[in-house]
Image (cartoon, rainbow, N blue to C red):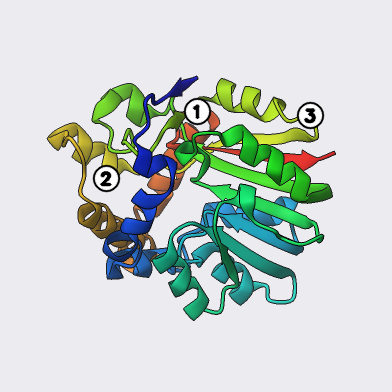
């Protein structure tokens, strides 16, 4: 298992994320991308397969974009709740009628109701004690409910080629999971069983930029701008001929567990 030590205090207590609220999470480019229809396409395909309805908790929900997709597309199927530590991002989620609670999941009183699904989309890599959060998810899931975990893939093609030049090897990522360590991590909570483990997402533009320029750290504004551009490309008619090639590359890398992220689906026993 790869992890950071020591971890700066502002990462450990959440101050870092709260201070980034206005400059990154609420930047126009980031918001436009997060709320685009294609933003959570892969996550939604996986999610709908295992959790077609029920009460959903999105941990690390940021501006609420994933839950907004559930509410707008399948309003009769889900009741939702978001959780995060970032005040500005949660304020925006509320403005979009996404119900949220602020604070650490470990300390929140969520009542006696159990959830059909709990999601950790790009969250566990930020946590000092991810197992405590996994155990909390097991507490909050109903029998047969599902927990969804997405983390960067330590064995991705990007990291194999770029190593620490890859922009997502970054200070706020304090855990780095491989296929093996994510499966082992999931097995540490006996009330949850691993029912699916996949590799997904591939961004050739990031790979090219980091190979060519190798910055020490990509600025938040640059990351948001690239996300905005790639989101626009996904929706552009002019890119229709290229999309099948990209989809094929994405599929092949996913089957080889070389795509950028890993997704684990766990079921409450």
Q: Compute the Cα span from label 2 to label 1.
A: 23 Å
Circle 1 residues within 10 Å: few <14, some 14–19, many ≥20? many
For the point 16% across and 33% down, which residue is it? 214
The image quadrant of residue 111 is: bottom right
Q: Is residue 254 left or right of residue 22?
A: right
Above-or-below relation of 88 to 122: below
Q: Tell me which residue sits at (77%, 49%) in the image.
A: 141
Find numbered disc 3 in the image and state the secondary structure of the residue it sits on: loop
Q: Which mark is residue 238?
A: none
Is residue 90 shown above or below 161?
below
Answer with left or right where residue 56 lies relative to residue 9. right
Q: Nearer the viewer, mark 2 or mark 1?
A: 1
Q: Tell me if mark 2 has few (under 14), some (14-19) or many (20+) residues whose alpha carbon lies within 10 angstroms of its own.
A: few
Instruction: Return the residue at label 3.
Output: 190
In primary-sequence order, the first of circles 3 and 2 is 3
Using the rendered view, name the quadrant where residue 129 is placed: top right
Q: Which mark is residue 205?
A: 2
Residue 239 visible: no
């Amino acid at each position: 298992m790869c992890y950071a030590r020591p971890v700066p205090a502002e990462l450990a207590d959440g101050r870092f994320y709260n201070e980034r609220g206005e400059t990154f999470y609420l930047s126009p480019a980031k918001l436009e991308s997060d709320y685009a229809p294609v933003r959570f396409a892969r996550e939604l395909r996986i999610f709908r397969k295992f959790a077609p309805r029920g009460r959903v908790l999105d941990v690390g929900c940021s501006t609420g974009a994933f839950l907004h997709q559930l509410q707008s597309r399948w309003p009769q199927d889900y009741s939702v709740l978001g959780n995060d530590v970032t005040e500005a991002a949660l304020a925006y989620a509320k403005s979009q009628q996404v119900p949220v609670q602020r604070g650490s999941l470990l300390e929140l009183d969520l009542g006696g109701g159990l959830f059909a699904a709990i999601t950790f989309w790009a969250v566990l890599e930020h946590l000092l004690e991810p197992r405590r959060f996994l155990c909390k998810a097991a507490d909050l899931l109903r029998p047969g409910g599902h927990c969804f975990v997405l983390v960067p893939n330590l064995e991705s093609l990007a990291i194999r080629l770029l190593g620490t030049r890859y922009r997502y090897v970054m200070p706020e990522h304090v855990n780095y999971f491989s296929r093996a360590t994510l499966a082992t991590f999931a097995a540490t909570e006996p009330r949850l069983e691993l029912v699916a483990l996949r590799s997904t997402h591939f961004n050739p533009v990031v790979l090219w930029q980091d190979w060519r320029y190798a910055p020490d750290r990509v600025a938040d504004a640059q990351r948001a701008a690239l996300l905005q551009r790639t989101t626009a490309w996904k929706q552009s008619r002019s890119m229709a001929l290229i999309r099948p090639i990209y989809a094929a590359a994405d599929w092949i890398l996913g089957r080889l567990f070389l795509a950028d992220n890993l997704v684990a689906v766990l079921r409450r026993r």
